[in-house]
Image (spheres, grey):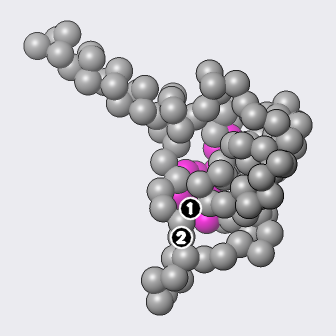
Amino acid sequence: MRPVERGNCPQDTAGNRIPFAQYRDARDHLIDRIGDYCSYCEVCLHSSIHVEHVRPKQPQPALERAWTNFLLACEEDHRADGAGSGPRASALQPARSALEEKVGRMGRGTSRA
Ligand SMILES: [Zn+2]
């Protein structure tokens, strides 16, 4: 599984966090950071990729434009999530999977030694 590392919120040249007037404005920044792949199924997409909300926008409207709540998703996974209206099952949390992959590599390393 590809690690999904979105990193800290992008900054402007003065070092200020870039505010997103609309969550869709984060799309190009997300593609720069994690590539144009769906964060859930890893399909490579070049045009039909959506900004996905990891946690639902409602009842916490602040999550709608929060960098830490963004990932990228293909049309199918975006729709499967109700277009950001519901929480994903923990088994499909790619950020968690990246950590698990690191832990898995550490485990494989020790078994070979
Ligand atoms: Zn997908």
Q: Quarter-wise, where is residue 26 in the image?
A: bottom right
Residue 39 drawn at (x, y percent): 64, 39
Q: In which quarter of the image is the C terminus?
A: top left
Q: Label 2 crowding class (10 Å Cα cut-off): few <14, some 14-19, many 20+?
A: some
Q: Residue 90, how many percent across, how many down?
A: 63, 25
The amino acid on which the numbered mark 1 sits, given as a three-letter code, is: Asp
Q: Residue 103 carries which label?
A: none
Q: Name the residue under label 1.
A: 32
Secondary structure of the residue carrying tag 2 is loop
Q: Residue at x 78, y 63 (%)?
A: 24
What residue is rendered at 66% in x and 33% in y? 40
Label 2 sits on residue: 10
Q: Give, as a single range, the part of the protein colored magenta.
A: 29-38
Mark 1 within 8 Å of ligand 1, using the beta carbon: no
Q: Nearer the viewer, residue 107 or 58?
A: 58
Q: Confirm or deny contact between disc 2 and disc 1 (CB under 8 A).
A: yes
Query: In this rendering, would 90 be left or right of 95?
Result: right
Instruction: Residue at 56% x, 61% y: name it.
Output: 32
Q: What element carries label 1?
A: helix
The residue depicted at 74 percent of the width and 61 percent of the height is 62
Instruction: Based on the picture, tell me whether residue 36 belongs to the magenta stretch.
Output: yes
